[in-house]
Amino acid sequence: MNQLHWEKLLCKSRKRNSNSLVKQDTASVIVRNAFEADYDRIVGSSSVRRLQDKAQVFPLQKNDFTRTRLTHSIEVSAMARSLGKAVGKQLEKKEESFTEDMTDELAALLQTAGLIHDLGNPPFGHYGETVIRQWFCGWFESNKFLKKEIFLTEQEKKDFIFFDGNVQNLRIVTKLQILNDAYGANFTYGTLATIIKYPWRSDSKATTEKNKFGYFKSEEQLVEEIRKAMGLSDGQRHPATFLLEAADDIIYVCDDIEDGVKKGYIPWELVYNTIKKQFDSDEYQELYEKIESKAPDENIEEGDKILSRVRIFRNFTQGYLFEIAINEFMKHYDSIMSGTYKKELLDSKKDFVDYLKKSVTGKYCFSCHEVLALELVGDKVIKTLLDVFVSALTESNVKELENAALFQGKIYSLISSNFKYIALHDYDQNGQKKLKDISMYDKLHLVVDFISGMTDSYAVNLYKELTGISLPQ
């Protein structure tokens, strides 16, 4: 592993040169840094807007209380920015070369990474990822694949067998979220490196061990360019990625509990007392004392008091984990910068965090009727859409696909033109290929790009239309 340096890690290079830095009218003074420009160019994008129609845990509600992927991402973005600011201030004291401007850049980089960290999640959340993986595992072993003697490399097959929203995320921001051309949002390399949580290929040994990988074969060349620009070795994380992961955990481990209490699935008083008994060391006693010192107003109705108590728990617990993450980052700073740190920043409190995830949210929320029903719907919808679109693209010739009078042509016509533009783009020649020239691998990506980019409601509506349950609206 390479020894890393912040001068390279806060890399402002982009795949395509950009003139996005805004200057004042009266003087050549840059008023936003490169990572703030990244945030500004994505915050109003269709990819971010779609997150408002993707469930976090519970099915989307008519009321506006329970969180969606969008509200979750906004909260992670704020937490990541704060972690970046706090760590940056520590590094200003630790390293003479780490400046105040670099603190601002690190905070902005993490703010952007937090906002976009879930863009690649398919409809129906993490269960949607599972369905896509299961479908491709079955398809690659079926006669539909084997009899056609379709050639795919082991890496290409594993890109779909181990499909992950985090991996799709990189593809979205580097290609699919079209601004002007085929280079997506054209983010800085610093931002792109930060969202690669597992920096290895799908056919790596590490993928089998962790069931995770970081980038598709289609983005491998870009990843190599990013590594070279920042001095990252193969398999080496950007240090900011540890802070991004911590921000995500800090937010969802507490927010899912709040949503569960609001929905009436978590009996908060019972659960809180159980947490206190389970984690009773002096360190946790200090946390409980802070929580209990902020009792809700006696005039508040009992139901609202419970919600108030769980929010107090959320706020203090997030603050507690925030401090843990900062302390762990600084404690293990040398090993993080040398690429030898293999843990997560909250691992020192893994028992506590896992208890909140599994014994609280997992026990009371993920097994409730509406979440299970949502997953069953997602299973049927995604598998049906994959059946229809993969069959059309892999079992039809070009004339059939380009003829909208035929069934296969109608299916192909439903796919967004943006996704077709990327599938047909020749990145070597910077031009457009013919449909007959694109590979089986690119066809599968085209289908997965289309389906994973759908919102929950769009996927359900398209499923209903294709199966004749309802007419197009």
Image (tube, rainbow, N blue to C red):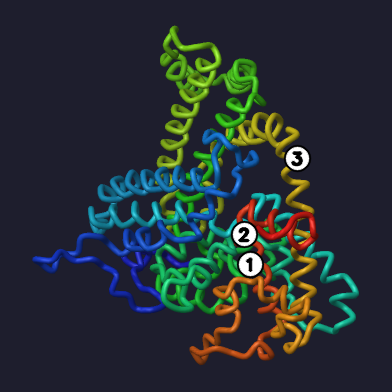
Residue at which label 1 appears: 450
Q: Which of marks 2 and 3 is nearer the N terminus?
A: 3
Which is more toward the observer, 118 or 64? 64
Which is more toward the observer, 325 or 85? 85
Evaluate if marks 2 and 1 touch, with contact meaning CB atoms under 8 Å apart.
Answer: yes
Q: In which quarter of the image is the C terminus?
A: bottom right
The local secondary structure at tag 1 comes to helix
Residue at which label 3 appears: 372
Residue 435 in percent (x, y) is at: 66, 87
Q: What residue type is labelled 1?
A: Phe
Residue at which label 2 appears: 454
Q: How far apart are marks 2 and 1 (CA)?
A: 7 Å
Give the foreground label among 1 and 3. 1
Q: Distance between the residues labelled 1 and 3?
A: 25 Å
Residue found at x 37% / y 48%: 81
445 is higher (above) or lower (below) than 373? below
Please indicate whether residue 141 sits to the left or right of residue 369 in the image: right
The quadrant where residue 368 appears:
top right
Give the foreground label among 2 and 3. 2
Q: Which amino acid does label 2 sit on?
A: Met
Counting labels gives 3
Q: Distance between the residues labelled 2 and 3?
A: 20 Å
